[in-house]
Amino acid sequence: MCGIVGYSGEKKALGILLSGLQSLEYRGYDSAGISLKKGKKIETIKTKGKVTDLITLIAESNIDTSATIGIGHTRWATHGAPSSTNAHPHYTERVSVVHNGIIENYRNLEKFLKEKNINRRTDTDTEIIALLLDLYLSEGFDFKNAFFKTVEMLKGSFAIAAISKDFDYMMLAKHESPLVIGLSNNETYIASDVSALIEYTHDFIFLEDGDIALIDKGNVTIWDKDKKETKRQPTQIDWSKEKAQKGGYKHFMLKEIAEEDEAVRNTIQSRIDEDGNVFLDEEISISKEFLKNLDRITIVACGTSFYAGLTAKPIIEKYTGIKVDVEIGSEFRYYNYLYSKNNLFIAISQSGETADTKEPLKMAKSKGIKTLSIVNVKESAIARLSDSCIYTLAGPEISVASTKAFTSQLAVLYMLAFYIAQLKGKDLKPQAKQLLKIPSLIKQTFDKTQDKTKELADKYYNYQDFLYLGRGICYPLALEGALKLKEISYIHAEGYPAGEMKHGPIALIDENTPTVVVAHPEEPLYSKSLSNCEEIKSRHGKIILVSNKQSDIVDDFIEVPKVDYDFAPFVYIIPLQLFAYYVALFRGNDIDQPRNLAKSVTVE
Ligand code: F6R
C-alpha cells in the first residue's frame, strides 16, 4: 500500500522523483524517501511524514542533486510502524530498494539470513529484499542475476525497484502489486501508476505478474514469469497532466465531485447511442447466450464500490428479472458462497487493486464462474484478472474519499442492466436515453446544492454524531453519505434504513444527534420517511432533509432537482458528498488524505 517511483535517464532524477511521489501520496503518506545514484555512490534520504517533510530534509542536506538515476517511495505502513528507520528506500552498502506490497515469507527469509549472520535493522519485510540482494552481490553475482535469485525467493505481493552502487541499471519486479514503465527517448520512468508520470510521457508498459525488468536510460528489457525475455506492447494513456492535478479547486475531493457530470458522461457516451441502444459487445467477451440465461448476479466489492453495487441491485433486478446478491469482499472471501447454475460474478473497484475484492474474483474464477469487473484504473489487477472488464471512464480519482467513482460505477451498472435486458428482448431504450440526460442533471445538482450544503455544514460541523436515513433506493445512499462523513470529518455517523430506526437506533436520538433524511418524493416512501422525521422531532432531534419536496417538519432542507425515482441516486448522492466535504473543511481536516486511510487497499 505504497507508491513507488523511479527514473533512469539523462535529466536530474530528484525533481522527477519528488513530483512523482507527490502524485502518489494518495497511495500512502506516513513516510517518504529517495535514493540517488551518482558514479559508484548511492545517497538516501528518508523521513517519517509526508513528501513535503522529505523536501525540507533534502533542502537542508548536501546530497548530490545532479544524479540521473534514482528511486523514491511514499509509504502506508504494513510491517513496522511509521518511522524514519522503517521508511523506504531500504539499503545496504551495495543496494537500495523500494517496495510496495507484502513479503509473506519474510520470517523464513530472515532466518535464512540470520544463519549467515545478516540481521535486519528495521521492522520491515522490505529490508529482507535489500539484504538478499546484498548477499548475492557479495557472493559475486552481477546485479541482474542477484536480483533474479532474490525475487525467486520471495512470496507475497510486490512491486520492487532496486539500484546498485556498482551497476548503472535499475531492476524491477512485479507480482500482484502495480508497476508501470513510462517510455521516452533515452530515459525511462517507473511508478505505481500513470498519474505520477503523465507529465513526462503518455506511453506506458504495464508489467504483468511475474515480470522482471531491467531499465537502463531508454532501454527496457523484460523477462516474463518463466524468465523468458519478452516484449510488452506499450499502451497510450491520454490523461492530461492538468486532469491529474487539482485544477483550481482547494481539494481533489471537491474537484472530483465537480467532475461527476463529466465522469458519468465519459462513461456512458461512447456506449449508448442517441436512440438508446447500449453497446457493450466489444467489452464483454462473455457469450450473449450465457448473459441471456443468467439466473443470478453476484456483485462483490468494498466500501463505496460496495454501496454502488447495493444501490444498483434493485435496478438490475427490476429491468433484467435476474436475482442480484451484493457481498462485501472481506467477508465473501471466507464464506462458502453457493453459486447458482448460470451465475455471473461482478467485481467493482475504483483502483482495481483492492485485495479484498481481488481475492473473491480469483476464487470465482477458480470455480469456473464467469467474471466481469467494473474498474476505473486501466490495466489494474482486477481488470486484468476478470474475463471481461468495463472501465468507468472517470479519470484519476486522487482524493482518498471516493466520489466520482461511485456515480461512474452506477452508470456502468445501469448500462449493464439495460444491456442484459436488451439481450433478453426487452425495450429499455427510453431508460437508456434517460441515462444520457443524467450528466447534466448531476451538474445542475452540484450548482444548486453547493452553497446550501456549505451553509449547513457551517451550522452542523461541531456535532459529534449523525444518523443518515433512507428508504428504498435512498437507503444505500444513506450508507454512503454516512461513510463519507466518517472518513473525512471523523464524526461518528450511521446509515440506516429509515423504517428500521424504531428497532434500535431511535435510542440515539436527542438534540445532539442530527439526522440526515434522504427521501425521494415518490409515494409511499416519502410519507413513510416523513413519519420517521416526526418520530425524530418528538425526541428533539434535528433533521436535514435531502429531497425534491419540502416538508415543514424538518429543520433544514437541501433541495435537489427533480429526477425519476430509478435515477435518483445520481442526484441525491451529490449533496451528501458535498456536505461531508464542507463539514471536514470547517473542522480543518486533511480532506484528501484523511487519517488512517489509504486510497488503494492492496493488503488484507
Ligand atoms: C470510500 C473509499 C473506500 C473504497 C474501498 C474500495 O470513500 O474510498 O471505501 O471505496 O476501499 O476501493 P476500490 O473501489 O478501489 O476497490
Image (cartoon, helix red, strand yellow):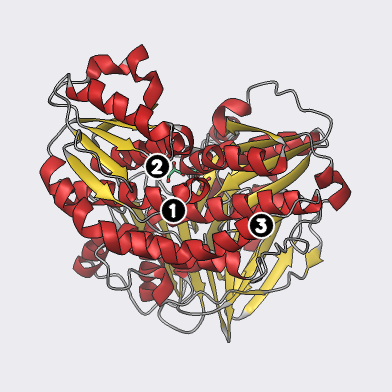
Residue type at the position of mark 2: His
Q: Is residue 252 left or right of residue 147?
A: left
Q: Mark 1 points at which residue?
A: 563
Most foreground residue, 100 or 248:
248
Q: Name the residue under label 2.
A: 520
Mark 2 Cα shell of 10 Å, populated few (<14), some (14-19), many (≥20): many
Most foreground residue, 32 or 458:
458
Which residue is found at the position 74% from the left and 44% from the top?
Answer: 371
Q: Which of marks 3 and 1 is in front?
A: 1
The spot of residue 169 in percent (x, y) is: 58, 71
Q: Name the residue under label 3.
A: 390
The spot of residue 53 in percent (x, y) is: 24, 58
Tell which circle, 3 or 2, labels the residue nearer the N-terminal end.
Answer: 3
Q: In this view, does 475 lie above or below 141?
A: above
Which residue is found at the position 38% from the left and 36% from the top?
Answer: 478
- Please tell me whether mark 3 sits on a helix, a strand or a loop: strand
The spot of residue 538 in percent (x, y) is: 17, 20
Tag 1–tag 2 contact (CB < 8 Å): yes
Residue 1 seen in this snapshot: no
Tag 3–tag 2 contact (CB < 8 Å): no
The CA span between labels 3 and 1 is 26 Å
Q: In this view, does 468 lie to the left or right of 420?
A: left
